[in-house]
Amino acid sequence: FYLNAIHHSGDIRKSVVNIMNNLKVGGIFCLHTHLRKPEEAVGGHPMSLTWEEVQDIISPYKARLNELHEHDPLKEGGHETAIICLEK
């Protein structure tokens, strides 16, 4: 489970590929991340990430959950939030 941290990895696509490659068959990877436009990528959140980019990154995998929320349901900020669970 990745809770609002994958955008700190430097290469989100590479991180997802690595995680999925290391999951056992039937394993589930859950991702929670805030979505930020390029102009919102500042300070401790240097990377932007859009819903469209997330969909492109996860497209090779089977999504068991794929939700876009206008505001973080965990109340971790006022950003759009993607909540996704991928199965290997």
Image (cartoon, rainbow, N blue to C red):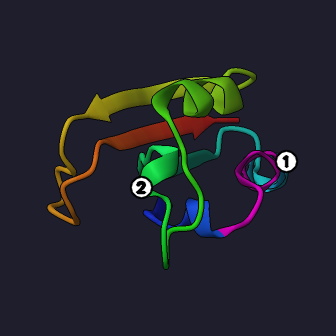
Is residue 82 something that shows in the picture?
yes
Q: Residues within 10 Å of mark 1 (few under 14, many from 20)?
A: few
Q: Earlier in the sequence, mark 2 or mark 1?
A: 1
Q: Circle 1 — which element?
A: helix
Camera-side residue: 19 or 82? 82
Q: Position of residue 83 (x, y in %)?
A: 38, 42
Is 63 rendered above or below residue 81? above
Q: Circle 2 — which element?
A: helix
Is residue 33 something that shows in the picture?
no
For this orientation, the residue located farthest to the front is 39
Q: Position of residue 53 (x, y in %)?
A: 61, 31
**Residue 68 shown in magenta:** no
The prevailing secondary structure element of the residues shown in magenta is helix
Q: In this view, does 3 lie to the left or right of 17?
A: left
What residue would you read off at disc 1? Answer: 21
Is 57 rendered above or below residue 62? below
Residue drawn 61% across the image and 35% down it: 87
Q: Position of residue 2 (x, y in %)?
A: 51, 62
Camera-side residue: 39 or 4? 39
Q: Residues within 10 Å of mark 2 (few under 14, many from 20)?
A: some
**Residue 10 shown in magenta:** yes
Camera-side residue: 21 or 37? 37
Is 27 rendered above or below residue 11? above
The magenta stretch is: 9-17
| Amino acid at dot 1 | Asn
What residue would you read off at disc 2? Answer: 40
